[in-house]
Amino acid sequence: MSHAQSKPDYNIVVDVDDDEPTLEFQDFATTNAQQGRMNVGGSSAPPPYQPPSSADAGNTTYSVWQVEYWAQFFNVDSRDVVQRTYLAVVPKDSFLDVYNANPDLWGTFWIPTSVIFAMFVTASLSQGIAEALAGSTHEYDFTMLTFAVFIIYAYVLVVGAIVYGATKYFGSHPGLMECFSVYGYSMAIWIPVSVLCVLPFNWFRWAMVAVGFASSGFFIMRSVNQIVSRSNGKLHQAIIPLLLVAHALLVVVFKFKFFSYSVSS
């Protein structure tokens, strides 16, 4: 009798277990180890660039000849641009992680344009003060404005395009707008540098130019290195020093063209 009763009890337990949801086991040790490898150092490469997409447009794909294609790159507000500008001047966090979440051309265009205006105005003001103190008559040199337009836009567009072509060739999956944005936003530091270089102290101007070079150079090198690190090649060993040399040449031009002046007697 006791054996006959124990068998139904056993069957009931089996039926209850069958009705319970199926349990799945996960190897947390393996998962945590993988996550640890992904986050080591906190400076892992950002994911490959993805162009922006409009939620209202659904699956619509726009041509580069359509206004809607370019409008999506201006879908930012002033807070977004200020945040990205801050990350370009004080690069303590990853600029590309923020930028690639919502790519824009607003800051990429307006920051270099503002630098052109700032350099021309402050250089003209410095020259005017020097000539006024020397008793000379000041005349605005508008060729300086033309030169600023050429050298700054050429640097952002040409060097940005070279970075895009080189990194794409070696399989780093860059975005053209992404490369332009790095060089466009890197110009932000030169706005306060231009204003401070109005002060008539040559040693102080050299110091401000050095700060501008260090800040913008570090931002460019860090951002390009993040793009390069998407591939397993050794491209950064060649491209990073070349980009640093190009940036140094630009800064030298800035110093002697816009941040120094002399009064002809």
Image (cartoon, grey):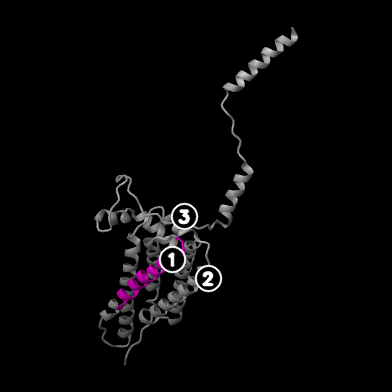
Q: Residue at x 49, y 62 (%)?
A: 226
- Residue at horizontal 28%, vertical 77%? 146
Disc 2 secondary structure class:
helix
Q: Secondary structure at mark 1?
A: helix
Residue 230 image point, x, y percent: 49, 59
Q: Quadrant of residue 51?
A: bottom left
Compute the Cα span from label 3 to label 2.
21 Å
Frontmost of labels 3 and 1 is 1
Q: Is residue 185 left or right of residue 21?
A: left
Location of the N terminus by quadrant is top right
Category of crowding for the residue at label 1, using alpha-carbon neighbours closer than 10 angstroms: few (below 14), some (14–19), many (at least 20):
few
* Prevalent SS, magenta region: helix
Q: Identify the residue position indicated by label 1 in the image.
A: 169
Q: Is residue 158 above or below residue 93?
A: below
Marks 3/1: CA–CA distance: 17 Å
Task: Decide: few, some or many residues near mark 3? Use Cα within 10 Å; few <14, some 14-19, many ≥20.
Answer: some
Residue at the spot of label 2? 237
> Total number of numbered labels?
3
- Pinpoint residue 170: horizontal percent, then vertical percent: 46, 65
User: Percent from the top left, x then y, of residue 120?
Assistant: 31, 75
Q: Report if residue 120 is visible in the image.
A: no
The alpha-carbon separation of the residues under discs 1 and 2 comes to: 15 Å
Mark 1 and mark 2 lie on one chain; the one further toward the N terminus is: 1
Any magenta on residue 154? Answer: yes
Residue furthest to the right? 2
The answer to which of 8 and 102 lies nearer the viewer is: 8
Point out the stretch of residues depicted in magenta: 147-172
